[in-house]
Amino acid sequence: MPERRRRGLRAFTPSKPAKRSSEGPAEPANTSGVSAPGPASERTSSVITAALYEDGQRTSTHHSLVETFRQLREQSGGMAWIGLYRPDPTELQSLAAEFDLHPLAVEDALEAHQRPKLERYGATLFVVLRAARYMDAAEEVDFGELHIFVGRDFVITVRHGAAPDLAAVRRRMEASPELLKRGPEAVLYAILDAVVDGYAPVVAGLQNDIDEIETEVFTNTPGVSRRIYELSREVVEFQRATRPLAGIVSGLSAGFDKYNIDEEMRRYLRDVADHATHVTERVDGFKQALQDILTVNATLVTQQQNEEMKALAEASHAQNEEIKKISAWAAILFAPTLVGTIYGMNFDHMPELGWVWGYPFALLLMAVVCAGLYVVFKRRDWL
């Protein structure tokens, strides 16, 4: 299997206004008349799209927030849908002044790094979502953050990251005027639906990664333990993005009851809740599967280490047997050498040197000692 690129989490990093990057797809300029995200030298505003709608139809598109505010005040019964990408504080503050946005929500939208949540500030909803997309080339998950302000006659979206593709959401809603004319709640539903639907490719990608890891575990692929750990981190991050959705949808449902939102919108919201629950269950299953894989991998690693230790012990035992044989034969051969050395010392007064049977006696002594040592070593299985 070819060597894979190192996995990792790619979370968004909010940039300073003077250093905006071109990260992520933006709503096209030909639908809004304003520039898309790009280098600072090419961008003069963080406003991606500022459009007004009435009865489900786009009535005007503006290049500045001032024009949007003026036209919205003149247009009775209309709705403003404003999209921002990593906005300047001055731009978001002007929106806050015009639509009476709560300072805490504005601060959250500027700083980002928020958990998914739903907050109500009077008649304004503030929703934070964590979008995700699976990057096939790097085999990793890229997370983005989306802040949504929803009021009686406006929807403001603030993106920090490449996902989700709000241009597709806008096109979908404009192609369904019957749904769009239901107002800001319909836009909020469409954005929620797009974020939850965007989780499906991520779920499929993570499932494929887990299947590959299972194969690597049983084929002893190098680095599989590291890959399990990194994928577990991605799954945990994905859980943090998906688990709060149930509470968000529940809070929206309660608000729909309180503010008498029509039954059709509630059906749409229940559909989003079903999809979110399905994703959450799959992600929880991934976490359990990775824990099981990690346990199996640890067992296989331990088993492999035991087999290596056993092989090492067997090799050491065989080496000890050879050493014992060598030592035994060395001792046997040392005995005649010792006898011969004693009788080769050439002293004048050695009684055995004058014996007639001295030479046969020396040979017999050598043989007896060698035979005795051989019997002893043989009984101890050294030979």
Image (spheres, rainbow, N blue to C red):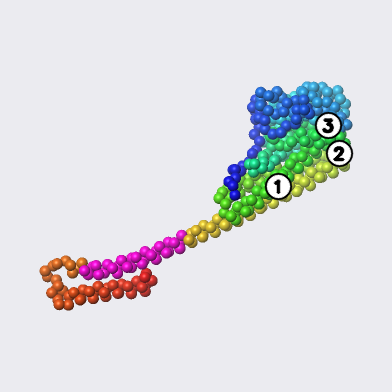
Q: Given contact means CB atoms under 8 Å apart, are the residues at marks 1 and 2 in contact?
A: no
Mark 3 or mark 1, earlier in chain: 3
- The answer to whether 195 appears left or right of 182 in the picture is left
Q: Quadrant for residue 117, please give it.
A: top right
As measured in the structure, the alpha-carbon distance from the residue carrying label 1 to the one carrying label 2 is 34 Å
- Nearer the observer: mark 1 or 2; the answer is 1
Relative vertical location of residue 282 with respect to residue 82 in this rendering, above or below? below
Residue that badge 3 annotates: 152
Residue 303 drawn at (x, y percent): 54, 59
Relative vertical location of residue 342 with respect to residue 123 in this rendering, above or below? below
Residue 313 drawn at (x, y percent): 45, 61
Q: Which label sits on residue 269?
A: none
Task: Give the dominant element type of the magenta stretch: helix, strand or loop.
Answer: helix
Amino acid type shown at disc 1: Ala
As measured in the structure, the alpha-carbon distance from the residue carrying label 3 to the one carrying label 1 is 38 Å
Residue occupying the point 36% across, 73% down: 378
Amino acid type shown at disc 2: Ile
Chain part drawn in magenta: 312-340
Residue that badge 1 annotates: 204
Determine the secondary structure under disc 2. Answer: loop
Residue that badge 2 annotates: 261
Residue count near mark 3 (Cα–Cα under 10 Å), binned few <14, some 14–19, many ≥20: some
Residue count near mark 1 (Cα–Cα under 10 Å), binned few <14, some 14–19, many ≥20: few
Relative vertical location of residue 149 with respect to residue 248 in this rendering, above or below? above
In front here: 110 or 169? 169
Residue 175 drawn at (x, y percent): 84, 35
